[in-house]
């Protein structure tokens, strides 16, 4: 099973996913398409997705270079520092987990989702 990336391209989507996170956790992966570390983190997520226990969790993909203002909006809305690559878990309208670079671990996210 491949990672079911959902493109995050519009500011309105942030409002929608924050609201939806009260019913079901949501993930956001912020990716720089020109960064080798970001590419490695994305590849790691894709390799581990099938065994992560997160198959029912929507995962949004943000291309930082194409949608830079949206990245800033995410930082403001959820009170986190912008990093790249970065994985965020949005639950109950708030960022419950954020990790960047090689600190991104789907096992950590899975543990937070099942709490």
Image (tube, helix red, strand yellow):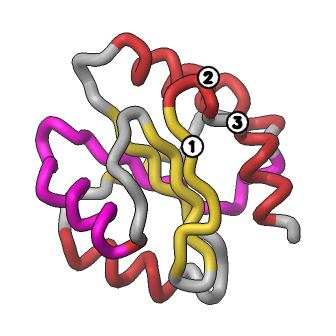
| Mark nearer the viewer, 1 or 2 | 1
Left or right: residue 54 compared with residue 53: left
Dot 1 or dot 3, earlier in sequence = 1
Q: Are marks 1 and 3 in contact (CB under 8 Å)?
A: yes
Dot 1 or dot 2, earlier in sequence = 2
Asked which quadrant contains residue 83, the reply is top left
On the rendered image, what quadrant is the N terminus found in?
A: top right
Q: In this view, does 95 lie above or below 12?
A: above
Left or right: residue 74 compared with residue 19: left
Q: Residue at horizontal 57%, vertical 43%?
A: 99
Q: Distance between the residues labelled 3 and 2?
A: 9 Å
Q: Residue at horizontal 12%, vertical 57%?
A: 69
Q: Distance between the residues labelled 1 and 2?
A: 14 Å
Q: Residue at horizontal 15%, vertical 49%?
A: 67
Which residue has dot 3 on it?
105
Which residue has dot 1 on it?
99
Local secondary structure at mark 1: strand
Which residue has dot 2 on it?
44
4 is within the stretch colored magenta: no
- The magenta region covers 53-77
Local secondary structure at mark 3: loop
Q: In this view, does 76 lie above or below 24?
A: above
């Amino acid at each position: 099973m491949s990672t079911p990336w959902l493109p995050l391209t519009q500011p309105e989507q942030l409002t929608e996913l924050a609201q939806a996170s009260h019913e079901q956790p949501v993930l956001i992966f912020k990716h720089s398409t020109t960064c080798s570390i970001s590419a490695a983190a994305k590849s790691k997520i894709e390799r581990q997705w099938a065994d992560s226990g997160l198959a029912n969790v929507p995962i949004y993909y943000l291309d930082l270079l194409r949608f830079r203002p949206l990245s800033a909006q995410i930082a403001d809305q959820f009170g986190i520092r912008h990093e790249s690559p970065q994985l965020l878990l949005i639950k109950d309208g708030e960022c419950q987990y954020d990790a960047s670079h090689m600190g991104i671990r789907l096992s950590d996210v899975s543990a937070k989702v099942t709490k």
